[in-house]
Image (tube, helix red, strand yellow):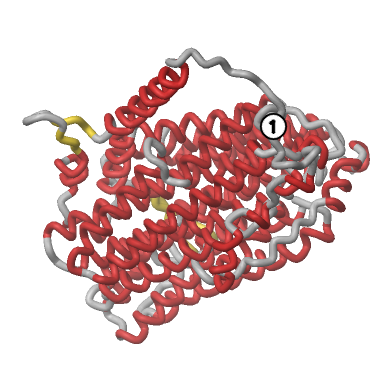
Amino acid sequence: MSATSLFWLALLILLLSSLSALVFKKKGALAGLSGTVLMSLSSLVLFFLACRVLFQQVHPLEFEIHFLSLAIPFLVDGLSSLFLMLLAVLTLSSAVFSSAFNKGFRTVADWKFYSVLPWLIAGLIGLLTVDDLGPGFTMAWQLMVWSSYFLVRWGRQAKLSVRPALVYLLFMEAAWLMIVAAPFLVKGYRFGAPLMEIGKNLAGSSQVVSLVFFVLLLLGFGLKTGMFPLGQFWIPGAYSTASPAVSALLAGVLEKTGVLGLMRIFFFLARGAQPNFSATFWGKTLLMAGTLTLFIGTVQAIKQSDYLRLLAYSSIGQVGYIIFALGSSLLAWSSGSATSQSLALVIFVGAVYHSLNHGIFKSLLFLMGGNLLYSTRTRDLNRLGGLLAIMPATGLLVALASYSIAGMPASSGFVSKWLMISGNFLAGRNSLLLTLCGIIALFTAAFTLACYVKFFGLAFTSAGARWKLKREVKEVPAPMLIAGLFLALICLSQAFLPMAYVKLISRSLNLSEGFLLAGSSQDYLTGSLFNLRIFDGQQWLAAVSPLVILFLMVVLLFLARALRQSAGSAEVQVPAWLCGYQDLNQENVYADRNMFSDLKKFFWWTGGNSNSVVDDEAIQAAKVLPEKEADS
């Protein structure tokens, strides 16, 4: 079967999935089962399509579909194939997760959920593959926006979901308007023209037109990614309102369509737009925008008591790292030196790597947040505690994802942040701006760690849930854990097989025509920069270094245990010392407001200070909604 046939087959299966939900409208269980099976099958076809393009084709897959008098161009190159892989993986995990979550936490009838979710996935496929900013882009965008609007709207009770869903819709339509309007400024623009043609036409336009063109696209795609200050208006409300499986797709892929848009504009279309494109100016712009986004988004996340809003604000911060890297890459490339241009390529690879990493570990965090919501029926960290003993599997998965997003050594986040930040520092030896922004990015990594120490600590390792929750808390059903375990294994592969992913990204760039940095030495990706010299003349690939770090950590743990037991001391279990208090209760445990309180006061000016949690009315409505009424 040809690659083009696989593309249409994936979309056809999604259509059948939506129709099957309508057919089984009065049988919610069958609607859920058919939707899960067909969406999973579609994700497998989509993954196979991406592998087909990456490993079996010499050139990108290009084709057109004709709609009325319009010819809509599609492009499945190496870069879009990577994001299609990510979409396939997250579709599969979200479908499996929803099959169990929707049974125990019902906010909308199954037939509604499973009839709309396939359209969101189809819209995302379109946005990742369409090669214009006209009719094809518009159809894919509107399909994505309206389907996700309904899914956000159905995530909670109407009283709590109407406003965030409406805000999301308005901002997405504003972003679409800016993106679609921008090419009309270009001299000789033909509605529905491919991006490369737009870039060539832009080269013949004026400097003012070029400036306004790139500003509109930066605002449009920046709004989609959550770039500061635009993301703060819609991301926290939308991500914390939608079902966790939908939030995983929104944060994992929908944001990345904006990232891919920025890459297409500033690293592909811009190549043909020269001399009307200044890599120095736009590199500085993206660098500063990304630095502000990563810093403020992360600081705002620390202030949240609603753990789903914490994850949403944190998503803004992590996307800020990607925008920061794109700006660093452009600025390093514009210097003109061979070394800096090679480093520009390394930084860009780090940005793509972090896009894939963030898609996996943030989706895992949202799914595990769904586990907490499913079992505890609360979003408030102050009402949780001690869950590691009750939900050990969920706790371990959250610990892995938290460790990864914090960028700790021997984690997937460490690899991509190392590429981005170290490349930034090396390229910034003669640039004060690069160096200062790199310092802020490195400093913010400590805030990310603090954020997830708070999340994991209050939810799993402190005490409190057993007297604050008026319900029995237990581990979630197997499908929800399997979905998380699937993402966790991918997360581990990203941590311990970094060179495999670097080479995959390198191959994807070789299969992406018109890449601005194509003149840089791509041998640098497999050269001495990614090798670690241990002894004279001996080299170990960077893939070994995470394993070495992990081995040393295990050795140190065993050594510490041996030293502790060397004196023959025995362990004795006694009641915890309560610092003079008689009983352990909510009056004498750590509260969210006390964690990093001085830090939060110092950074009050960053915003996000309102951290009230509303979960009673919506949760109760979902809890008592009868099966028969929900299916009506």
Instruction: Point out the residue furthest to the top here.
Output: 568
**Total numbered circles:** 1
Question: Dividing the image into 4 quarters, which one contains the N terminus?
Answer: top left
Query: In terms of depth relative to the viewer, which is nearer, 13 or 86?
Result: 86
Q: Position of residue 518 (x, y in %)?
A: 21, 55
Q: Is residue 508 left or right of residue 256?
A: left
Question: Dividing the image into 4 quarters, which one contains the C terminus?
Answer: top right
Vertical placement of 590 versus 166: above or below? above
Query: In terms of depth relative to the viewer, which is nearer, 477 or 119?
Result: 477
- Residue type for callout 1: Ala
Label 1 SS: loop
Residue on which disc 1 sits? 576
Q: Is residue 143 left or right of residue 126?
A: right
From where the camera sits, is residue 238 visible?
yes
| Residue drawn where x is 45% and y is 60% of the image | 320
Q: Residues within 10 Å of mark 1 (few under 14, many from 20)?
A: few
Q: Position of residue 112 (x, y in %)?
A: 77, 45
Q: Is residue 110 left or right of residue 283?
A: right
| Residue drawn where x is 39% and y is 59% of the image | 441
Q: Position of residue 630 (x, y in %)?
A: 88, 42
Vertical placement of 137 versus 624: above or below? below
Q: Position of residue 70 (x, y in %)?
A: 49, 64
| Residue drawn where x is 58% and y is 42% of the image | 365
Query: In terms of depth relative to the viewer, which is nearer, 63 or 240?
Result: 240
Query: In terms of depth relative to the viewer, which is nearer, 276 or 450?
Result: 450
